[in-house]
Image: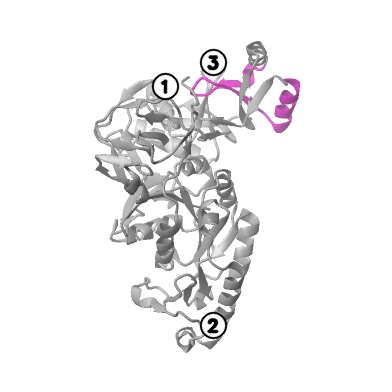
């Protein structure tokens, strides 16, 4: 219990959304409030030389999208916030899914113009699996978008979550005049092309006051009074416990690019967001207040600095105190390891830290000891559960274009697939390498990084597979027979587990009904045991 104060100071959350909803822009504004950066960079536009702080890979800058989760820590009003900015593009969904296992709450960004999009649905499904508390930020209110009531209804129906408005917009698009904070009873006025400042906040404790008409005009004032009365009648006070259990999501309206409505959300976030929570392990649930240190690796990034060929493993601290230069037990390898330069992150900038507590995300230099899902403890032998590996949807064979660089290619493939962006399969009884990904863009990123970071050039040949299923059986002989008969469709993953590559849904269903003794799994719990 001695670390209670440190635990109560920490909030760890991820920002998720469909691509282009304004996630990275919102991240920049949070950092601005925390004093972590002085100017926010635009993600797109060639004219702007300053890139977004959280997009640090060359390919991210070229394309104006995020392709890797970035980790940033900053302080705001004496609260230490660990923020994980995730890629929105569906091709990088797996990185995002795993990031969600390392956070305690989520901010979901919805574009007011496009409403709920495909990727938003998939991400919310993962949040619901874990009952993760969600705050919704409806962005781009300064553009002509959907009606605010229609938006709320669409989000509730599509994402199957109850909403609770905390701020309410006055018009949208070119007529957007600001938002009224239903909780703090104040009005934040919007002026196009200017950043929100403290002078724009007007305290209006009672909406019937004539000051409101003066500020926004009679017509908009009467609409706001009606809306506010309706909302307060329907929703009342925010039930914080329902938010913490993932049943209700507070909603904020604003414009991230104009830094408008963001501060109100951040203030509410530090007031209601959960402190680090207990985590499930193979032995028991680990409470953050336990004295002994424990944590797990949820992300690995190779070549964060291409000049130094460094690999960084991202560790989420779950309990106790992590200390620099102290030996900790690596459960899968059953050996003790220590770290002389553990880092805390500000996207690509790193600071060496002496200690970290539950909720913190620490970067560890990795010489190849870590895989995603690995657990570090202070001597105990358990591992954290619930870190999934999903069945890929696109499969391509790796063709080496330069036989002189075979070693570099193999090393690059191993290291990049260790990051978890793609899965590497080796054909059973052969050495054909097959990469499985969730989306096509990942192949481009892998090809680009293999060339830039390892000097290995390759191309990919599409394979006619529909899904990869991990196969297990209580009867080893049945499993043996199946792998022998179906050897053309059998591969092994990086850990040596058997995988059946199905050509189509029909083939998969046929094999499942013909082989009742064999179990087909569409997700594998990562590294459940030492292999």
Residue at 75% x, 21% y: name it. 514
Q: Is residue 96 visible?
A: yes
Which x, y percent locates residue 5? Answer: 32, 48
- The correct choice, above or below, for 509 with respect to 142 in the image is above
- The correct choice, above or below, for 223 with respect to 121 in the image is below
Q: Is residue 390 left or right of residue 264?
A: right
Residue 68: in magenta span: no
Q: Quadrant of the N terminus?
A: top left
Q: Are marks 1 and 2 in contact (CB under 8 Å)?
A: no
From the viewer's side, name the closer residue of 423 and 329: 329
Residue at 65% x, 14% y: name it. 475
SS state under label 2: helix
From the viewer's side, name the closer residue of 321 and 87: 321
Q: Is residue 41 left or right of residue 206?
A: left
From the viewer's side, name the closer residue of 99 and 119: 99
Cα separation between marks 1 and 3: 18 Å
In the rendered image, the residue lying farthest to the top is 477
Count residues near mark 3 (Cα–Cα under 10 Å), then give few for <14, some for 14-19, many for 20+.
Answer: few
Q: Which residues are magenta?
A: 486-515
Cα separation between marks 3 and 2: 71 Å
SS state under label 1: helix
Q: Is residue 115 visible?
A: no
Residue at 53% x, 30% y: name it. 525
Residue behind mark 3: 430
């Amino acid at each position: 219990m001695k670390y209670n104060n440190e635990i109560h100071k920490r909030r760890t959350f991820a920002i998720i959304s469909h691509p282009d909803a304004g996630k990275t822009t919102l991240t920049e504004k949070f950092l601005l409030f925390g004093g972590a950066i002085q100017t926010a960079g635009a993600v797109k536009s060639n004219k702007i030389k300053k890139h977004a702080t959280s997009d640090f890979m060359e390919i991210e800058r070229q394309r104006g999208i995020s392709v890797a989760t970035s980790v940033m820590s900053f302080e705001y009003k004496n609260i230490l916030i660990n923020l994980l900015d995730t890629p929105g593009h569906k091709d990088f969904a797996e990185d995002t899914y795993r990031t969600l296992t390392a956070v305690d709450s989520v901010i979901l960004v919805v574009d007011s113009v496009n409403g709920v999009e495909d990727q938003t649905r998939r991400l919310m499904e993962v949040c619901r699996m874990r009952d993760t508390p969600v705050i919704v930020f409806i962005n781009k209110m300064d553009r002509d978008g959907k009606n605010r009531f229609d938006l709320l209804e669409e989000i509730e129906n599509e994402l199957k979550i109850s909403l609770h408005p905390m701020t309410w917009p006055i018009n949208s698009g070119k007529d957007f005049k600001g938002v009224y904070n239903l909780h703090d009873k104040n009005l934040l006025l919007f002026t196009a092309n200017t950043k929100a400042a403290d002078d724009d906040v007007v305290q209006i404790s009672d909406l019937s006051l004539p000051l409101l008409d003066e500020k926004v005009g009679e017509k908009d004032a009467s609409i706001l009074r009606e809306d506010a009365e309706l909302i307060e009648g329907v929703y009342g006070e925010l039930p914080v416990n329902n938010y913490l259990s993932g049943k209700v999501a507070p909603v904020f309206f604003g414009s991230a690019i104009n830094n408008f409505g963001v501060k109100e959300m951040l203030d509410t976030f530090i007031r209601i967001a959960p402190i680090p929570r207990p985590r499930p392990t193979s032995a028991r649930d680990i409470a953050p207040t336990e004295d002994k240190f424990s944590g797990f690796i949820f992300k690995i990034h190779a070549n964060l600095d291409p000049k130094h060929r460094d690999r960084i493993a991202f560790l989420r601290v779950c309990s106790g105190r992590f200390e620099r230069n102290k030996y900790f037990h690596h459960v899968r390898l059953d050996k003790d390891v220590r770290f002389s330069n553990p880092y805390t992150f500000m996207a690509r900038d790193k600071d060496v830290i002496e200690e970290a507590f539950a909720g913190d995300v620490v970067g560890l230099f990795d010489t190849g000891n870590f895989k995603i899902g690995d657990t570090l403890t202070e001597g105990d032998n358990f591992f954290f559960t619930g870190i999934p590996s999903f069945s890929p949807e696109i499969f391509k064979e790796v063709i080496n274009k330069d036989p002189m660089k075979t070693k570099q290619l193999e090393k690059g493939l191993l290291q990049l697939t260790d990051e978890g962006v793609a899965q590497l399969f080796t054909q059973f009884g052969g050495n054909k390498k097959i990469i499985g990904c969730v989306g096509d863009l990942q192949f481009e990123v892998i090809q680009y990084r293999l060339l830039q970071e390892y000097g290995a050039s390759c191309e990919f040949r599409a394979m006619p597979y529909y899904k990869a299923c991990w196969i297990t059986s209580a009867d080893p002989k049945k499993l043996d027979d199946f792998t022998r008969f179906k050897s053309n469709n059998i591969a092994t993953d990086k850990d040596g587990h058997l995988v059946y590559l199905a050509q189509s849904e029909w083939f998969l269903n046929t094999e499942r009904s013909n082989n009742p003794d064999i179990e087909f799994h569409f997700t594998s719990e990562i590294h459940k045991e030492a292999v």
